[in-house]
């Protein structure tokens, strides 16, 4: 089989056909890990993608396309573009402190960020120019559940109002969804190859909210993004941590093309997922970044990677990825071993056939 | 005569207003605060925990029930203090260094309080030294560490190590929990207890001090 481009590899596997080799990319890769591998601190994220010959690059909206206003001298406390106050620790992403909307009256006067700001697409434009046709350029969008819980209403406010004031949740969801759809549309106009929607719907134990609330509050906006992506002929991938067994059908019915990460820490087995719904969506995952990639030996990384490909690679429908992201605790040598193992064990036809 | 199981029902349904009204009425009817707690509130919040454990309740239901419980406890606290009702135990809780996610910690704290524990919430993003300092000066039975991110799990182990180095490890039982953690990891790291969710945390805490 001829060597495919990263983009071809991903599109082929998502269509449940076997590419030349199981594709790989990550939602994010920590700079410390990247620098330790390239020995070049001035290398950009895109340089690293090229250095490791990774099949896709994900443009994380919170990093590349959100604005923040510093609120503390050390810049660790900032107000995000939605008005939420966020604390930044040593990791890349911020964590919510104070939500923007404290009462229903705040919604009446709320002014959302402008998705048409040109600067939001600068990074995407540059990556499209650099990688178009070779690697999949993925536009990432943080979903309504995440934005509402972390920036607009706060997690307690969002969860409680699902029961106490569902109309408020509908109004907040509509604000975010309107922005999201416009943002995705603009990303596709700029040349993004696919869309990745993140936002955790589940915890280790199970879904955060009931099936009824998942269908009522979370699924409709995902479906709208999927429909927009599909209307433009591009794929829509979805990430959610946690044990999604009780709600996986809702996610799939929203029309997504691929699902990440089939969370092993939540007891999700990728072989079982392949058997139950692997014919309906492409699976993305699920080598553990909490244990194996962080604390395991290179041999353990290779064995787990091999096992994931053995369980879920047959017939395509697998993008081999970590169980979340390559965070700062991942051993750089383990990440390198992971990528090498995918290319070794993931060559089609698979040797386990 | 007010039936205390109506208070339990209000807690289970997360009906804040009904619970507050019923608790006030019970006090007016000279029902003791301890009886309202033991026969009204605690059975209610235990049932909520069971429903959560059984996958029938989720975070929204848990939170509205917890809110109803907290409101009722605020009314009862002055009475409980007067009658010197002894807490089940003293629990110190906080999220580990680098982790500012507090919803899980807050739900655990709420469930513990609802089950008669005295809870001191240290907050979020706490260094091992801050945990050690509080353990040293306080008189706690259990320290609960919350780590909601894969990348902050090592900070929980570092806190445990810091307690050992400070000679405080024997003074307190240490529990851990949070989305990426597992029983196997907690056992390997040497924690005394692990809980995957808030209702389990209440059971494990009780077992650790011999109250189960």
Image: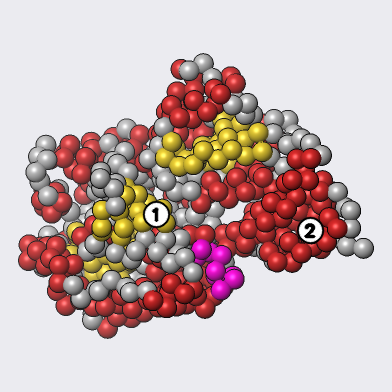
Q: Position of residue A257 (x, y in %)?
A: 33, 71
Observer-nearest of A61 and B134: B134
Q: Chain of mark 1?
A: A
Report which residue position mark 2 lands on.
B23
Q: Distance of mark 1 from mark 2, alpha carbons?
A: 35 Å
Observer-nearest of A49 and B192: B192
Q: Position of residue A96 (x, y in %)?
A: 39, 54
* Residue visible at 62% across and 35% down in the picture: B91
Q: Can you say which quadrant of the picture contains the N terminus of chain A?
A: bottom left
Residue A91, by quadrant, is top left
Judge from the rendering whether residue A193 lies leftward or rightward of residue A227; answer left or right: left
Q: Can you say which quadrant of the picture contains the C terminus of chain A?
A: bottom left
Q: Position of residue A45 (x, y in %)?
A: 15, 51
**Within-10-Å neighbours for mark 1: few <14, some 14–19, many 20+:** many
**Could one spot residue A280 in this view of the protein?**
no
Report which residue position mark 1 lands on.
A96
Q: Chain of mark 2?
A: B
Q: Which residues are magenta?
A: A157-165
Seen in the picture, residue B32 relative to B188 is either above or below; the reply is below
């Amino acid at each position: 089989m001829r060597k495919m481009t990263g983009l071809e590899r991903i599109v082929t596997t998502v269509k449940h056909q076997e590419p030349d080799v199981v594709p790989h990319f990550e939602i994010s890769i920590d700079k410390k890990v990247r620098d330790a591998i390239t020995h070049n601190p001035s290398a950009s994220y895109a340089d690293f993608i090229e250095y490791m010959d990774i099949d896709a690059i994900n443009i994380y909206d919170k990093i590349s396309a959100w604005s923040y206003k510093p609120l503390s001298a050390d810049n660790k406390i900032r107000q995000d573009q939605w008005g939420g106050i966020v604390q930044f620790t040593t990791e890349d992403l911020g964590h919510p402190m104070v939500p923007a909307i404290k009462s229903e009256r705040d919604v009446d006067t709320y002014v959302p960020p402008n998705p048409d700001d040109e600067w939001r697409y600068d990074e995407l434009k540059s990556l499209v120019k650099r990688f178009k046709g070779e690697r999949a350029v993925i536009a990432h969008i943080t979903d309504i559940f995440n934005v509402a819980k972390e920036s607009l209403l706060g997690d307690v406010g969002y969860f409680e109002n699902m029961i106490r004031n569902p109309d408020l949740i509908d109004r907040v969801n509509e604000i975010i969804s309107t922005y999201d759809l416009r943002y995705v549309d603009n990303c596709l106009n700029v040349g993004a190859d696919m869309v990745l929607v993140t936002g955790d719907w589940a915890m280790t134990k199970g879904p955060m909210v009931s099936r009824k609330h998942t269908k009522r509050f979370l699924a409709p906006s995902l479906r709208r993004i999927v429909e927009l992506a599909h209307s433009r002929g591009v794929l829509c991938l979805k990430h959610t941590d946690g044990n999604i067994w009780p709600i996986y059908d809702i996610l799939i019915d929203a029309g997504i093309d691929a699902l990440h990460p089939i969370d092993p820490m939540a007891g999700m087995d990728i072989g079982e997922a392949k058997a139950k719904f692997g014919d309906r969506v492409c699976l993305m995952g699920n080598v553990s970044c909490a244990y194996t990639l962080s604390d395991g030996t290179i041999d353990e990384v290779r064995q787990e990677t091999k096992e994931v490909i053995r369980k879920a690679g047959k017939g395509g429908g697998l993008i081999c990825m970590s169980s979340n992201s390559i965070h700062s605790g991942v051993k750089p040598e383990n990440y390198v071993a992971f990528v090498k193992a995918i290319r070794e064990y993931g060559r089609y036809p698979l040797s386990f056939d | 005569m007010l039936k205390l199981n109506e208070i339990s029902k209000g807690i289970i349904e997360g009906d804040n207003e009904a619970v507050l009204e019923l608790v006030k009425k019970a006090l007016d009817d000279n029902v003791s605060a301890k009886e309202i707690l033991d026969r009204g509130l605690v059975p209610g919040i235990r049932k909520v925990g069971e429903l959560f454990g059984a996958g029938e309740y989720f975070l929204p239901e848990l939170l509205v029930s917890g809110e109803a419980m907290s409101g009722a406890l605020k009314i009862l606290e002055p009475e409980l203090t007067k009658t010197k009702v002894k807490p089940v135990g003293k629990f110190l809780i906080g999220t580990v260094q680098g982790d500012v996610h507090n919803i899980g910690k807050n739900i655990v704290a709420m469930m513990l309080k609802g089950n008669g524990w005295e809870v001191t919430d240290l907050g979020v993003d706490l260094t091992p030294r801050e945990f050690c300092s509080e353990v040293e000066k306080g008189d706690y039975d259990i320290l609960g560490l919350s780590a909601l991110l894969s990348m902050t799990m090592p900070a929980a182990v570092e806190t445990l190590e810091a307690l050992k180095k400070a000679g405080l490890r024997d003074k307190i039982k240490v529990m851990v929990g949070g989305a990426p953690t597992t029983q196997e990891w907690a056992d390997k790291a040497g924690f005394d207890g692990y809980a995957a969710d808030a209702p389990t945390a209440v059971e494990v805490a009780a077992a650790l001090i011999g109250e189960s």
